[in-house]
Amino acid sequence: MVCVNGFGSWFDRARIISAFCKCFWSVAYYVVRIGDALSQLLNVVVFFGTNPNESVSGRAYRLQKTVGWKQLRIVIDVLFSFWEDNHCELSYNADLARAFKLIDEQ
């Protein structure tokens, strides 16, 4: 590494930043997968769900016309509004995409 005025070259700094970004997004994706797994666990254990691959948010969206689930969907969407709009709908679509992917792999 060639140093200029005590700093690495632009190329070296760019490589460090690139490596940091890759590491950050890998960790972020891992944390999201853990959250998804915990949501599926809660769906089965706490809400007595029959589908172990469905998240609480996805189930709240799917059953939003049912008393209780509509209110839960609203609460979840508000809690996750800092992350994304329409969290429950997006979770429902992600649950479906995961199910279709599993079917395609068979």
Image (cartoon, rainbow, N blue to C red):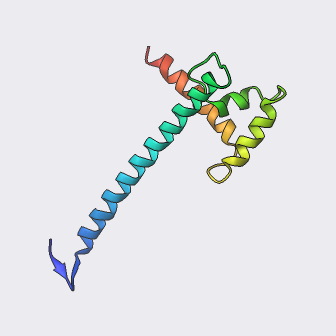
Please state if 106 lies on the left or on the right of 9 as rendered: right
Q: Is residue 72 above or below residue 100?
A: below
In which quarter of the view is residue 46 placed? top right
Q: Residue furthest bottom?
A: 5
Q: Is residue 62 above or below residue 18?
A: above
Instruction: Name the spot of residue 85 as percent of width and height, x first.
Output: 68, 48
Q: Name the residue located 76 percent from the left edge and 36 percent from the top edge.
A: 72
Instruction: Name the spot of residue 63 as percent of width and height, x first.
Output: 76, 26
Instruction: Name the spot of residue 61 as percent of width and height, x first.
Output: 72, 32
Locate the N terminus by quadrant: bottom left
Q: Is residue 29 above or below residue 6?
A: above
Q: Residue furthest left?
A: 1
Q: Name the residue located 22 percent from the left edge and 75 percent from the top edge.
A: 8
Locate the C terminus by quadrant: top left
Please state if 87 lies on the left or on the right of 68 as rendered: left
Q: Name the residue located 41 percent from the left edge and 47 percent from the top edge.
A: 27
78 and 92: which is toward the camera: 78
Q: Name the residue located 61 percent from the left edge and 22 percent from the top edge.
A: 44
Q: Is residue 104 above or below residue 90?
A: above
73 and 101: which is toward the camera: 73
